[in-house]
Image (cartoon, helix red, strand yellow):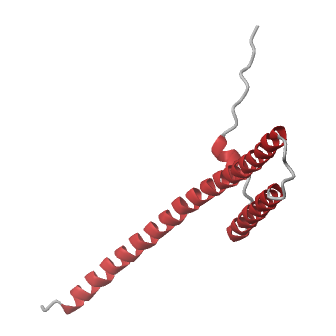
Amino acid sequence: MFVPKPKRPNTKNSLQRGFPKNVPKALVYEALAGFNRNFEQVLQDLERLATLDLFTERWQQRAFKACRATLEETRAWANFEVIEVLHQTEERDWTRLGRRRQRREKRSASSDDVYSTKSSVRKSPR
């Protein structure tokens, strides 16, 4: 009996599909900054609650620390996932734009060579 292997998703392609082409990258970076700013506010508010001596029992203090750690882990996880998509997008754009620049420089250099050859032909005495 043959059991087909489950297909592993192509990580690179799935990440590229995760970033719509019509969304400006600046909006994604701004949203990520806002996300982190708001998360920081939540953590500060949580700390402020702790200063009000609400958590007097040891189990309450442990639960508070676990809650804070869970929030920080969640923020780190979300940042990682978004940054992974951004990393792939930036890497793809960097490669594409670098190739474009190299082609332009190559065309410019070859047109300069043609121009300098034509100029030197005209100026050469006979």
Classify 35 as above or below 108: above
In-front residue for pair 9/99: 9
Q: Is residue 69 left or right of residue 124?
A: right
Tally of numbered tags: 0
Seen at 40% across and 77% down, the residue is 108
Would you place residue 106 above or below residue 120 in this image? above
Q: Residue at x 35, y 75 (%)?
A: 109
Image coordinates of residue 37 in percent, x first then y, are 74, 65
Whether residue 47 sits left or right of residue 105 in the image: it is right
47 or 95, which lies in front? 47
> In the rendered view, does 108 fall on the left or right side of 88?
left
Hey, which residue is sitting farthest right in the picture? 54
Name the image quarter holding residue 21.
bottom right
Image coordinates of residue 68 in percent, x first then y, are 76, 49
Residue 91 placed where, x, y %? 56, 57
Q: Nearer the viewer, residue 107 or 70?
A: 70
Point 84% across, 42% down: residue: 57
For the N terminus, the image quarter is top right
Nearer the observer, 9 or 100 = 9
